[in-house]
Image (cartoon, coloured by chain):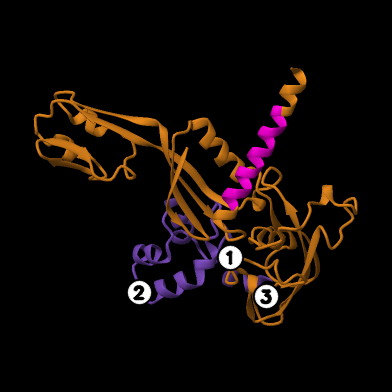
Chain colours: A purple, B orange
Amino acid sequence: MIPVRCFTCGAVISKHWDQYKERISAGEDPKMVLDDLGVKRYCCRRMLLTHKELVDIFAPYQ
Amino acid sequence: MDLEFLELTDRRARFIISGTAPAFVNSIRRSMMADVRAMSIDDVNFYNNTSVLFDEMLALRLGLIPLTGGKHYLSRSECSCNGEGCFQCQVSMTLNVQGPATVYSRDLASADAEVVPADGNIPIIKLFEGQQLLLEAIARKGSAKNHAKFQSAIATSYKHLPKFSVQECNGCKECVEACPKGIIRYENGSVHIADELECTLCNLCVEACDTHAISVIGDPQRFVFYTESDGSMSCADLLTISVESLMNRAGELATYLEAFG
């Protein structure tokens, strides 16, 4: 799951995750999406950019 | 001292503060981060958790969700219930979601309509078929001195505004080229800064100038202050509460000093 807040500055970034994921999978440029969502600082941007969702992979091994 | 607001919304504030000293501006910054208290989920009782995350991890995620309101709540230590927990110092929230579904912060049902997650669309955990999450979360008042989850002010910072001076400019425009922010303009035979808020005091213009005509220093009396709120309170509240706390402490110090004569 996406961390609730940015590790560095503490801004709540997880609230953007659903929209970010949806727009990325629709083929939009991450840079434009992040600018659009108002995620300005690079500490917050890397949180979304580098996140790998693992819940679906773990799910069968419960 | 003078304040000029460039931006003031619930979630973001940027202002110029002038006629003061760095120590004072920094004390506002520190007070904003450490003295402003907010509500946050502090204890979680799990009744059923068959999700892929451990109870502890879920509790940590829940704690980081900013909660609005709760100004009149007391912290556990100052409450008359002596920390046992009562309506004056804690709010109970329940959450019950059956999979398949993603649990969001908006699924938390709070006993106090004022104390609710600031953002409803924070994903907590994705539940699959047959999984359930049933818990009771206790929100309490706290300060960032104890845990960062109670900190409402985010990316609180200030910087000096530049003091830019030019003597005998020869019009080579090297500094215009050198400025990474592109804010130096050449007009009427001399250069000046078009947007001083953008200046980072990097001094590249000073180095680029062959005739040593430019000098840039941080103005010791003028600052641009920036802060964001996590949504638990407005930026105006953040600022007023922090300044009040600062005033109270300064008052306390004055009485101590008087006692010593």
The quadrant in which the C terminus of chain B is found is top right
Q: Are marks 3 and 2 on the same chain?
A: no
Where is residue A56 shown, x and y percent of the image? 58, 72
Q: Position of residue B238 (x, y in %)?
A: 59, 51
Q: Position of residue A32 (x, y in %)?
A: 34, 65
- Dot 1: element: loop
Residue drawn at x 53%, y 61% is: B10
- Answer yes or no: do the residues labelled 3 and 2 have beta carbons within 8 Å? no
Residue in the image at 30% along x and 42% along y = B196
Identify the image quadrant of residue B38: bottom right
Q: Residues within 10 Å of mark 3 (few under 14, many from 20)?
A: some
Q: Which residue is mark 3?
A: B107
**Disc 3 on helix, strand or loop?**
helix
| Residue B104 visible in rendering | no
Q: Which residue is mark 2?
A: A27
* Point 71% across, 61% down: residue: B70
Q: Is residue B38 left or right of residue B10?
A: right
Q: What is the span of residues highlighted in magenta in the rendered image? A: B238-254
Which residue bears the numbered disc 1? Answer: A1
Q: Secondary structure at mark 2?
A: loop
Secondary structure mostly taken by the magenta-highlighted segment of the chain:
helix
- Tell which of A60 and B144 is nearer to you: B144
Pointer 3 and pointer 1 on the same chain: no
Chain ID for label 1? A
Q: Which of the two discs, 3 and 2, sits closer to the camera?
A: 3
Q: Does residue B259 appear to the left or right of B107 in the view shown?
A: right
Tag 3: amino acid: Asp
Contact? badges 1 and 2 (CB < 8 Å): no
Residue A62 quadrant: bottom right
Marks 3 & 1, CB-CB < 8 Å contact? no
Q: CA distance from mark 3 to mark 1?
A: 17 Å
Tell me the CA gap for discs 3 and 2: 30 Å
